């Protein structure tokens, strides 16, 4: 049997073939009639019937829902079993849709949470790397100073190649500056001026080398921090090495954590893809909710039909349940109430129709009597007209004999007394 997923059926107990509209007991053009009160009572009873029928439908839905919940695995009535199986199938589909919606929401929450955590980790990692990088210049300077004291520091010299070059150039510029100072002491005024200009140039070059050393210290510190040079350091320099190493480890741990979170996000997205919610999850959730709403309507229809079968066939023996038995009694009482109210409506309609027929019969008899009286008047009028016609014909014959010279002219005799041709109208009898 097809399932109507839009409308919930209204029980058609003995209503089939009956017209629930009130009988037109009065002519509205004639004002209020005695039947108006009866008509209003019928309308009230019709409203009660509709309420009771809706209540029976609700009770049948509850009976079907309860029966689906407590029914044994097998029942003897085939149609009843079919509806129970349909209800179970729809219930599983509804639960599946609900689970999909809840899982989509949970996955979206997890993805949002993991994304925010990754963003926090990126900010913390960038902060750690900036703090680590800010120590590279100090670390490079300290390590370069320690390199000169190490007897076996040749293995680390390639890491300080730029610094060694700049340091050598700095020593050469320093030696050149000292030589210019020595020359300046034995020269005259004009030669001293020339040497002073050279000294300014040498000092400018030395300043350039100092600035270059700053960048070279930072580069050397970033390279030396990745080696085991820390084993030669002590004191503050060793603490500086430990600090950069700890920050590097913390940044690497955050990067690894982000990789794990990214893998979790990818797993969640694959599950969303399986749920057909990867591209537009909100639209998918709306579709699932709409589908669930339709399934709930279908389930309510199935429960209603199940309850109707339970009540109509009295299947209390199939399912032994006190709540179902109580619901059955409630529906039986409602149906009895409906039967009594229908009897009241039938009685009121019959009374109204009897009253209307009697009123119309009385009116018809009054009208018939009036027409009979009119017909008697017409018959008398016809007799009078016939007499006048006969008198006229005899007078016409006499006048023709006068024209033929057969008889002398005599005045026409007067007509005999006749009843009035058109008597005054009489008042019709009053209508009841």
Image (cartoon, helix red, strand yellow):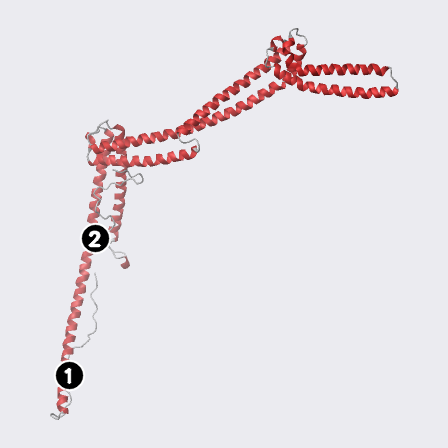
Q: What x and y, as percent, mark residue 75? A: 21, 29
Q: What x and y, as percent, mark residue 344? A: 21, 46
Q: Is residue 49 above or below residue 270?
A: below
Q: What x and y, as percent, mark residue 50? A: 27, 43
Q: What x and y, as percent, mark residue 188? A: 88, 18
Residue that mark 2 sits on = 352
**Count of numbered marks:** 2
Q: Nearer the viewer, residue 35 or 143?
A: 143
Residue that mark 1 sits on = 392
**Is 287 placed left or right of 307 in the picture?**
right
Q: Nearer the viewer, residue 289 or 306?
A: 289
Q: Nearer the viewer, residue 184 or 386?
A: 184
Hey, which quadrant is residue 198 in on the image? top right
The local crowd at label 2, few if under 14, some if 14 to 19, many if 20 or more residues have their Cα within 10 Å, is many
Q: Nearer the viewer, residue 148 or 362?
A: 148
Q: What label sits on residue 338 in the rendered view?
A: none
The local crowd at label 1, few if under 14, some if 14 to 19, many if 20 or more residues have their Cα within 10 Å, is few
Q: Is residue 83 above or below residue 243?
A: below
**Is 286 placed left or right of 160 in the picture?**
left
- Secondary structure of the residue carrying numbered label 1: helix
Mark 2 or 1 closer to N-term?
2
The span from disc 2 to disc 1 (Cα, nearest Å) is 60 Å
Q: Please name the residue shown 58% across and 20% down the image.
A: 129
Q: Is residue 113 visible?
A: yes
**Quadrant in which the C terminus appears:** bottom left
């Amino acid at each position: 049997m097809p399932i109507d997923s839009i409308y919930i059926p209204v029980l058609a107990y003995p209503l089939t073939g009956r017209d629930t509209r009130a009988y037109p007991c009065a002519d509205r053009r004639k004002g209020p009639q005695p039947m108006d009160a009866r008509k209003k009572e019928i309308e009230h009873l019709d409203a009660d019937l509709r309420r009771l029928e809706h209540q029976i439908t609700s009770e049948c839905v509850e009976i079907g829902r309860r029966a689906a919940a407590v029914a044994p695995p097998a029942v003897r009535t085939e149609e009843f079993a079919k509806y129970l199986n349909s209800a179970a199938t729809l219930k599983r589909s509804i639960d599946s849709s609900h689970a999909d919606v809840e899982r989509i929401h949970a996955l979206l929450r997890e993805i949002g949470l993991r994304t925010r955590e990754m963003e926090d980790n990126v900010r913390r990692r960038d902060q750690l790397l900036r703090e680590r990088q800010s120590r590279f210049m100090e670390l490079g300077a300290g390590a370069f100073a320690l390199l000169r004291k190490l007897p076996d520091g040749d293995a680390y010299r390639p890491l300080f190649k730029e610094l060694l070059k700049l340091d050598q150039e700095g020593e050469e510029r320093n030696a050149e500056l000292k030589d210019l100072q020595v020359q300046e002491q034995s020269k005259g005024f004009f030669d001293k001026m020339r040497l002073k200009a050279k000294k300014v140039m040498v000092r400018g070059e030395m300043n350039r080398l100092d600035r270059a050393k700053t960048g070279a210290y930072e580069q050397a510190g970033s390279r030396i921090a990745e080696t085991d040079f820390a084993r030669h350091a002590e004191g503050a320099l060793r603490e500086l090495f430990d600090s950069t190493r700890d920050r590097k480890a913390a940044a690497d741990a955050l990067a690894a954590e982000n990789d794990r979170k990214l893998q979790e996000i990818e797993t969640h997205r694959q599950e969303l893809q399986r749920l057909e919610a990867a591209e537009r999850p909100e639209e998918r959730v709306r579709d699932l909710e709409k589908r669930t709403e339709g399934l709930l309507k279908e389930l309510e229809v199935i429960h209603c039909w199940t309850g109707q079968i339970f009540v109509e066939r009295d299947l209390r023996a199939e399912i032994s349940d006190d709540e179902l038995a109580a619901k059955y009694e409630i529906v039986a009482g409602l149906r009895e109430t409906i039967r009594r109210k229908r009897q009241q409506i039938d009685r009121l309609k019959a009374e109204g129709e009897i009253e209307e027929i009697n009123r119309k019969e009385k009116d018809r008899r009054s009208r018939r009597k009036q027409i009979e009286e009119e017909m008697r008047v017409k018959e008398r009028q016809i007799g009078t007209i016939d007499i006048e016609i006969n008198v006229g014909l005899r007078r016409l014959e006499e006048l023709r004999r006068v024209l033929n010279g057969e008889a002398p002219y005599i005045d026409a005799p007067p007509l005999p007394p006749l009843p009035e041709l058109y008597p005054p109208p009489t008042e019709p009898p009053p209508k009841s």
